[in-house]
Image: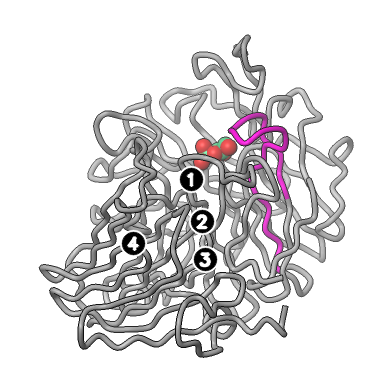
Amino acid sequence: MHQIHLKAPNNWINDPNGFIYYKGQYHLFYQYFPYAPQWGTMHWGHAVSDDLVNWEHCGIALYPTKWADRNGCFSGSAVELDGKMYVFYTGVRYLEVDPENIHKPFNEQFEPTQMMITSEDGFHFDNWNEKHAIIPPIENIAIGNRIHTRDPKVWRGKNGWYLILGSSLECKQGQVLLYRSSDLTHWEYAGKAMNEALPGWGWECPDYFESDGTGILLFSAMGMEEPVGESQSHSLCCTASFDEESCRMSLSDQYQLVDYGKDLYAPQTTTDAQGRRVMVAWLRMPHPTEEGWIGMFTAPRVVEYRDGHIYFRLHPSIRQALQKPIDCASQADAGIYCIRTALHDGEELKIGGYRIYRADGRLYADRSALGEDSEGHQMVSQTPPVQDGYEIEVIVDKNVVEIFANDGEFVITHVVYELEPQVTASKGVELQMYTTDSMEG
Ligand code: FRU
């Protein structure tokens, strides 16, 4: 079945984890609370895909079994070595438990240990015998905050392996910690990177990679806006230079939002079968759907650095899956379709009550007519001034609208609940619409 946007199988999901192209398939794990549609003791759910378009859920891969991860297996990543999958994650142990909800810590008192588990095939994980602690909780507060250090992302360098952690300096400034290893098992602390010009009192889910020879850091910054709360946390990206020998990383002062809809959080990348840098991210939802699940992922996007700008382009496999022309949205296969058009200042496109328009050189998206006004769920979003042209590509699925300006110059993604399949546009705006070919599924 087409699942361009991977959704929670039931109950709650958040961050994508362990995203990897491994033995001919894409594996995508995710933060999963299997008992209720709310955040709680974290497991790793697991899904696989041959093509990044059709996903199959495969149940639970990781779950608490050890003292260090007794209260949850937090976010992390996966790499391949000699045919084995090596998975890195943050094991969490609560120091104080909420007496009314044992799935949550009290007063934010928990202890993170960085852990590793290997699998021979990417499907079987021996949670009892194969887990190892690789980095103990931070002792030295000059290095980082003991509680808020997590989410190992590992990559292969020219002469060894590197691991980056999201962290905080004294709960005031976001930062990343860097480690290195020659065997994926023994890790040594090798330094840290921060830049006071970048926002957030703490950073989560860092991801470092190169695009066209330029280093890029993705990170999710907690508490970017006042008043500080969960919804004031957003995913950012900046250029970064990293020297493997010295393990020095320096971060640019300038940043972009990964997505201007601000529902997106905790993106993670890997390389696809063609070597492109492909990203997926969690879409935060204000409440569960009628079917009782909450949390979904973006369509895969290709991250590319070009002429001083970081682009988030719709992955070509999605465009390829959406090539059956239709005349109106009600003809869409399983409610999934894409709209291609161009919008100039003063012009708009409407999908049911959802408005996409261009004014003062920016792209806007307004979901206020759909209701669902809840805290931290931004009703009207806007991009910075658009430079590359007027092209718009919109992907519409049952609970999400993704709007790509000029092949990923900027993206606005909005979670939606009720969207009438009725597409209209200002006079003179030409639309092309495509859906998936149901014979493929
Ligand atoms: C980001 C995050 C990560 C953590 C995980 C816990 O959304 O807070 O930092 O590992 O979620 O579910």
Magenta-tinted stretch: 26-45
- Among numbered discs 1 and 4, the one appearing first in the sequence: 1
What residue type is disc 3 on? Asp
Q: Are marks 3 and 2 in contact (CB under 8 Å)?
A: no
Q: In this figure, which residue is indicated by the disc labeled 4?
A: 354
Q: Secondary structure at mark 4?
A: strand
| Residue projecting furthest to the left | 360
Q: In this figure, which residue is indicated by the disc labeled 1?
A: 285
What residue type is disc 1 on? Met
Which quadrant holds residue 172?
top left
Q: In this figure, which residue is indicated by the disc labeled 2?
A: 281
Between tags 2 and 1, which lies in front? 1
Q: CA distance from mark 1 to mark 3?
A: 14 Å
| Residue projecting furthest to the top | 99
Q: Nearer the viewer, residue 352 or 108?
A: 352
Q: Secondary structure at mark 1?
A: loop
Q: CA distance from mark 3 to mark 2?
A: 16 Å
